[in-house]
Image (cartoon, rainbow, N blue to C red):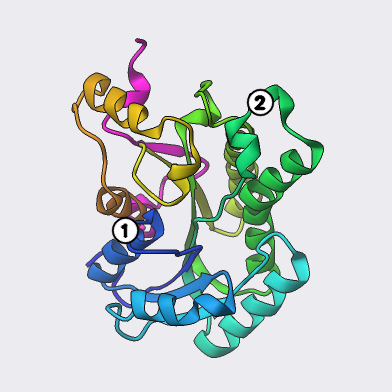
Amino acid sequence: MLLENKKILIMGIRNKWSIAFGIAKSAYENGAKLIFTFMGEENRRKVEELTSEFKGSKTYVLDEASEDDKVKEVFTKIKQENGKIDGIVHAIAHANTQDLHNDFIYTSKEGFSHANDVSAYSFVLVARMAKELEMLNENASLVTLTYYGSTKVLEGYNVMGIAKAALEASVRYLASNLGEIGLRVNAISAGPIKTLSAKGIKDFESILTVVEKKAPLHRNVTTVQVGNVATFLLSSMSEAITGQVIYADSGYNIMGI
C-alpha cells in the first residue's frame, strides 16, 4: 500500500461528495492514518459521523485557515497529539456568492481579498506553520486543489479563477522554498465534479456536459479518481515531482476547441 503507516492531514472536509472525502477514501485504502480539520464546532457530529469509516482518524476544528494564530494553535495541538505527519492536503477555498454570480468586473475589494485569503494565502500559511512547528517528517508532501479556471476564462468562476491562479503560483514558490529541506509541493487540477462548492458556479451542469463531450476520454472524473492522484502525490512514488499542477480531468485541458 502506497501510504502504509503514513499520517496524512486533510484540511477542509465537508461531506461525502467532496473531493476531500474522495482523497481520504483513497489514502485510507492505501494504508494512511488520517487527521482532519473542518469548520464549525456545530459541524463536529456530522464530520465525525462522516469520517467514522476511517478507523483511528482524528478531527480538529479550524474555523479560519487564513489566520496565523488560529492555524498555529490547531497545528500545535495536532503535533502534540499525533507527532510528526507525512503529508497535508489543502482542500480549502471560498468566494462570496455575489462575486460568482455577477460579472468579474464588479468584484468588490472585500470579495477579492476574501477569495484570495481563504483560497490561496491559507495554503502559504499552512506550509509556513508546518515548517516552523517542525511537524512534517522527512520527504513529506503537500497537495492542494486547483481548477482549469485559473488559466482560462470560465463564465461564473470569476474571482475564484484569480485566487486559483495565485494558488498555483504559490505552489511553485513554495516548492522552491521547501525543496531545500526535502519537502514537495504540488497541486491537482481536477475536472468539474458535483460538489457543494460547485453549486455556486453559474450553469455548472453545462460545464459537465461540455467536458463529457470534448475531453479525450469523454467522461467526467470522480472524487475517488482525483483521490487516487492525491495518493500518488503523497506517496514516495512521486518523489521526483514538485512544483507541478497535475491535471485530473480526463484530458479536457489539452483540447483547443
Hey, what amino acid is under mark 2? Phe
Magenta region: 232-257
Question: Residue 244 lies in magenta, yes or no?
Answer: yes
Hey, what amino acid is under mark 1? Gly
Q: Total marks drawn?
A: 2
Picture residue at 65% right of the left edge, 42% below the top: 173
**Residue 95: x, y in percent?**
62, 45
Which quadrant of the figure contains the C terminus? top left
Image quadrant in which you'd find residue 46: bottom left
Question: Residue 12 lies in magenta, yes or no?
Answer: no
Q: Name the residue under label 1.
A: 22
**Residue 1: x, y in percent?**
22, 67
The front one of 144 and 147 is 147
Q: Can residue 166 be seen in this view?
A: no
Picture residue at 64% right of the left edge, 69% below the top: 63
Q: Mark 2 points at which residue?
A: 104
Image quadrant in which you'd find residue 192: top left
